[in-house]
């Protein structure tokens, strides 16, 4: 019995360690262009695609556009899906990106500074 446990213990420990590295996918700012007023928001996942809150992606885009002096962010329809880690016959890591257009010109503060 002890011999069987001694063989399984290292495998069990490794699985626990790997499980500790797993994180939940989260939306995050993924680039864009202040000059063009375009914000990209994305998340990455492995395996089955998670249910993600679109409201969180919208809030990140709104904040980024606001930081740039725009009044709001409007979703550009569609999503881009890219395999960022190809494992031969399957994709080991997928990246999903949404794009937003910052709208309504600059905020009043930015307009006042530009005068």
Image (tube, rainbow, N blue to C red):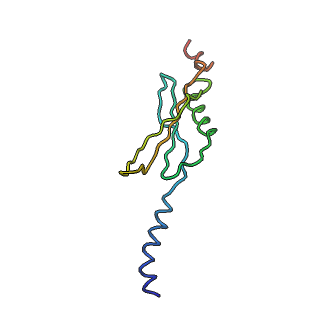
Determine whether, in the image, residue 33 is placed left or right of residue 89.
right
The furthest residue to the left: 88
Please say if 100 is above or below 45.
above
Q: Nearer the viewer, residue 64 or 50?
A: 50
Q: Residue at x 37, y 52 (%)?
A: 87
Please say if 13 is above or below 67.
below
Q: How many marks?
A: 0
Q: Position of residue 44 (x, y in %)?
A: 49, 46
The furthest residue to the bottom: 1
Please say if 104 is above or below 82.
above
Q: Position of residue 82 (x, y in %)?
A: 44, 40
Q: Residue at x 47, y 30 (%)?
A: 32
Question: Which quadrant is the C terminus positioned in?
Answer: top right
Q: Position of residue 72 (x, y in %)?
A: 62, 26
Q: Position of residue 100 (x, y in %)?
A: 55, 29
Q: Nearer the viewer, residue 112 or 7?
A: 7
Q: Residue at x 58, y 38 (%)?
A: 57
Determine whether, in the image, residue 61 is placed left or right of residue 11.
right
Q: Quadrant of residue 66?
A: top right
The furthest residue to the top: 115
Q: Residue at x 47, y 88 (%)?
A: 1
């Amino acid at each position: 019995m002890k011999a069987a446990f001694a063989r399984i213990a290292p495998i069990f420990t490794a699985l626990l360690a790997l499980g500790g590295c797993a994180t939940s996918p989260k939306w995050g700012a993924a680039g864009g262009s202040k000059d063009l007023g375009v914000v990209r928001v994305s998340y990455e996942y492995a395996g089955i695609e998670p249910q993600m809150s679109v409201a969180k992606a919208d809030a990140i885009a709104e904040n980024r556009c606001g930081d740039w002096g725009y009044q709001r962010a409007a979703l550009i329809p569609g999503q881009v899906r890219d395999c960022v880690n190809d494992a031969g016959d399957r994709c080991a890591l997928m990246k999903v990106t949404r794009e937003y257009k910052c709208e309504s010109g600059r905020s009043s503060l930015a307009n006042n500074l530009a005068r």
